[in-house]
Amino acid sequence: MPGEVVVVIGGGVGGLVSAALLAARGCDVTLVEAAAGPGGKLRAVMVDGEPIDGGPTVFTMRGVFDEIFAACGGALDDDLTMRPAATLARHAWGEARLDLFADPAASEAAIGDFAGAGEAEGYRRFRAEARRLFDALDRPFLRDTKTDPITLGWRMGARGLPDYLNLRAYSSLWRALGGYFRDPRLQQLFGRYATYSGSSPFACPATLMLIAHVEASGIWLIDGGMHRLALAIEALGRRNGVRFRYEAPVREILVERGRAAGVMLASGERLAASAVVCNADPAAIGAGAFGPAVQRAVSPMPPRRRSLSAMVWTAQTKTAGFPLSRHNVFFSEDYPAEFAALAAGRLAAAPSVYVCAQDRDDHGHTSVGHERLQIIVNAPANGYGAPPTEAEIDTCRRQMLDSVSRAGLSLDLAPSTVLTTPHDFAAMFPSTGGALYGPASHGWAASFRRQGSRTAIPGLYCTGGSTHPGAGVPMAALSGRLAAACLLKDRASTSRSSPTAMPGGISTRRARTAPTG
């Protein structure tokens, strides 16, 4: 909308997408970010002079980004080089291994070889159910504004009534998986998708099995790492006129005559605007991090509803003894005990471990001696108060190494390895306690309780992985699109211009993030 002045707070995926789409529609957009470059959680960590992905590592739902780039007059392939992965991930339980593939027939055959024909048949039924749930919720929930259960049923319509009545919201994911798989290892494997939203498979609804369909529909490997995606969206925004101001933290969101009117930076500079899009965890707004005038713009989130955090090691190291793929999961021997410890606010004594081998190609090959790894252990979001002691860090590191060594993987982590703890994440993302996914998806109503694009203050909008429709890179992008669409629709309704649809409808050292601007 020509003449509309918008300030976007935060350069995560949601903020970058909102800024690019609004600028493409003729808005005057300035994005302000406290860090030195774009990305937010989609960040790079420098280790021995090399950038290593320190945030999300799995790129799915490419079509969402193709549509966003097209809506802004660009093409994703002009800014990024990527290729589809044939192998989705490698999973290990001690010496036992199982790969999943982009080809569902190959995955089915691998499961049959691993656990028998009955489990392969269970996988077929599980895959069909995951797809049904995704197809049912994609347009009326994931790609539309936040809703309530009754409105969701109305959006799904008469044809969608059978799906609406069977969204699997009242059964836990873990319990539902028992209806498809008798092998507890396969229950672990597919229950792990709950952690994609920082949740427990024992507490989240079975609806989340749709995440398995998202991943099975295609993973893309981005040359140079996932953080390049943030740079690509930033470049898209620049081409459409977005101004980016880094190392410019916001002290306060300004409110005049009952509506958002701009921001005040920590430096004291005021940036006037007719609308503000906040790409921060809504918990920060509710906690007063952006001033008392907007504190009641969102519903408060109690700490008990926080999603998981993580202990994340980024390293350049030599590996031996296990044939790493790009994405690897080493499962604990006792999944219930692991998540019981996390629920009690403790690290698991024998954790599951995720390893992203960033330099591995789709065949598991690497041409480098010291390869770049990101290693993740789930942790409670208790990143407030005193940071972990060196003894606690050493214990966690030893437990992580013990977990991967059971599968034969040997890691020699150099002193240059960077560890990011929940305490570090809490410092980077205030008022979260280090939670990486906003609120956990526990209970049938969790998805409906997430903050939507609109807030209680006119002209103030929220976006990011902590808002509707949920956590993850594609969900954050969809939230950015929704925030932009809501802003334009609201302004059009109060102006003389005719409302129009959004084009391209998408209907161990402490951590240091590398400057990527």
Image: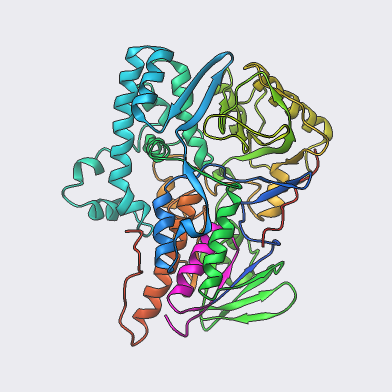
Nearer to the camera, 74 or 342: 74
Is residue 20 in the magenta section? yes
Measured as percent of width and height from the top left, residue 47 is found at: 76, 44
Q: Is residue 453 visible?
A: no
Residue at the image position 73 percent from the left and 72 percent from the top = 266
Is residue 101 in the magenta section? no
Q: In the displayed structure, does residue 389 sit left or right of residue 74?
A: right
Nearer to the camera, 129 or 440: 129
Measured as percent of width and height from the top left, residue 370 is found at: 73, 33
Q: Quadrant of the C terminus?
A: bottom right
Q: Is residue 266 above or below residue 161?
A: below
> Can you tell which quarter of the image residue 117 is in?
top left
Q: In the displayed structure, does residue 470 sit left or right of residue 278?
A: left
Nearer to the camera, 422 or 298: 422
Specify the farthest residue to the front: 367
Q: In the displayed structure, does residue 480 sit left or right of residue 375?
A: left
Measured as percent of width and height from the top left, residue 32 is found at: 63, 69
Q: Is residue 73 visible?
A: yes
Measured as percent of width and height from the top left, residue 509 is found at: 81, 42
Residue at the image position 16 percent from the left and 47 percent from the top = 159
Q: Is residue 113 above or below residue 255?
A: above
The magenta region covers 1-28
Residue at the image position 59 percent from the left and 40 percent from the top = 308
